[in-house]
Image (cartoon, rainbow, N blue to C red):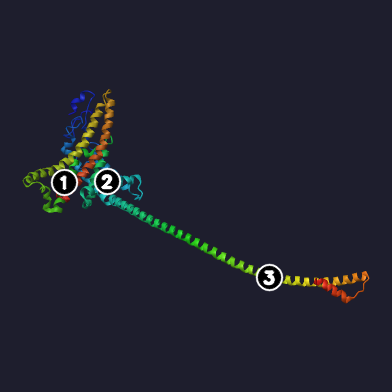
Amino acid sequence: MASEAKSEGLVFHPMDQFIVKPFFGEGPIEFYTFTNVAFWMVAAIVVVIAIMVLGTSRRAVVPSRSQSIAELAYGFVYKMVEDVTGKDAVGFFPYIMTLFMFIVTANFLGLIPTSFTTTSHFAVTAILALAVFLTVTIVGFVKNGAGFLGLFWVSSAPLPLRPILAVIELISYFVRPVSHSIRLAGNVMAGHAVIKVFAGFAAIATIAPVSVVAIVAMYGLEILVAFIQAYVFTILTCVYLKDALHPSH
Amino acid sequence: MATPKTETLSACVDSYGSAVGMPQLCGEWMSNQIFWLVITLLVIFFVLSRIALPRIAAVLAERQGTITNDIAAAEDLKAKAAAAEEAYQQALIDARAEAARIVEATKAEIKADLDAAMAKADAEIADKAKASEAVIADIRANAMASVEEVAKATATELVGALGGKTDEKAINKAVDAQLKG
């Protein structure tokens, strides 16, 4: 789509940053190929281990700075699980913590210039959202049996309305993983693409200052988005899990 | 931008190496992403659930325990301090009472000693006064006798000098009469 604009100096390739390619050399991409995706996911693992394991290795009663970060993340997600899902849901805490730490780390690693943002791809966020969807559905049926279907039967509504509401509830239930995944990937992708477009404008000397200021502003916004989207994904997971554990409205 | 490549490696990339459409929708990359995502999530999950989260939970519990213990110890020490303060005040009151008692006792003792000493001194003074009176009476008696003797002697001599007859009996009679005067 961008190749037509090649004739002049103004070229935008805002989507090129999302291309998956082998990290070493060139070649076809098989599922096991060590790609830029793989590299930045491994980087996310390393960062998570650095924060959560190395940072807490001293087990100090009075925490150091790095230990404070790990404790802050722990308390933040733990409180979220406890408040939103309920005290009986703390068994899901490691799972939710994994989602949160991966998303927040991948989002922030994606903000490093020239890096690859793994959470900007629907393939990644869809798997995350599907995992949540499957967990919620399975847990719902295991814990409540057929009573989980009560989630779709709004007993507080007038009887004639209930079948209609049940259809709406059912649709909204199956749309959850779609919105859940597209919200995250869409936000991250849009911000990165907009920054890239502003960066393209910087080639024109007269608007370059404006462009640079805009990039800085967008970058600030993206830092906010990186955290907020991880938070939103996590809290929605907690809300969905609450439906599975307590399906009554 | 990039020089055109002779062959493209992917249907999602054009001959210049740019993305065709949204790379997010490129189906042939998805298996790779999913594969690495699953590995990543499993690794993070195991690291968190086996190492990091139990450790942080232990640290937080330990901190909570330490804080609770410290607060309890502080309460304990506070109570001890209050008890010590009370004991100190009590000791102070006791000491004051004891001091007052000792002062009283000492005063009484001194008074008794003083009284005894006074009584003894009075007795001694009375004895001495009596003895002195006896001496004085003695001296007075002696003095009267001497006066009589001197008077008789003097009268005798005077009578003699005047040419009278020294009749001792008459002189003594006259002197005695005069002394009785």
User: Does the rendering let one see residue A20?
Assistant: no
User: Observer-nearest residue: B109 or A9?
Assistant: B109
Mark 1: give few (<14), some (14-19) or many (20+) Cα within 10 Å: many
Per the model, the C-alpha gap separating discs 1 and 2 is: 23 Å
**Circle nearer the viewer, 3 or 1:** 3
Chain for numbered disc 3 = B
User: Observer-nearest residue: B55 or A237?
Assistant: A237
Are the residues under marks 3 and 2 on the same chain?
no
- Residue lying at the far left of the rendered structure: A160
Residue annotated with mark 1: A133
Q: Is residue B136 left or right of residue A188?
A: right
Q: Which mark is residue A76?
A: 2
Q: Is residue A219 above or below residue B99?
A: above
Residue annotated with mark 3: B126
For the residue marked with disc 3, what is the amino acid?
Answer: Ala
Q: Give percent across and percent down for residue B178.
A: 83, 71
State which quadrant residue B149 falls in: bottom right
In the rendered picture of this protein, how many numbered marks are placed on residues? 3
- Residue lying at the far right of the rendered structure: B163
The residue located at (81%, 71%) in the rendering is B179
Chain for numbered disc 2 = A
User: Observer-nearest residue: A60 or B126?
Assistant: B126
Mark 2: give few (<14), some (14-19) or many (20+) Cα within 10 Å: few
Q: Is residue A246 above or below residue A21?
A: below
User: Does the rendering let one see residue A125?
Assistant: yes
Q: Give percent across and percent down for residue B138.
A: 77, 72
Q: Give percent across and percent down for residue A8.
A: 22, 23
Whether label 3 touches label 2, CB < 8 Å: no
Between disc 1 and disc 2, whose residue precedes? Answer: 2
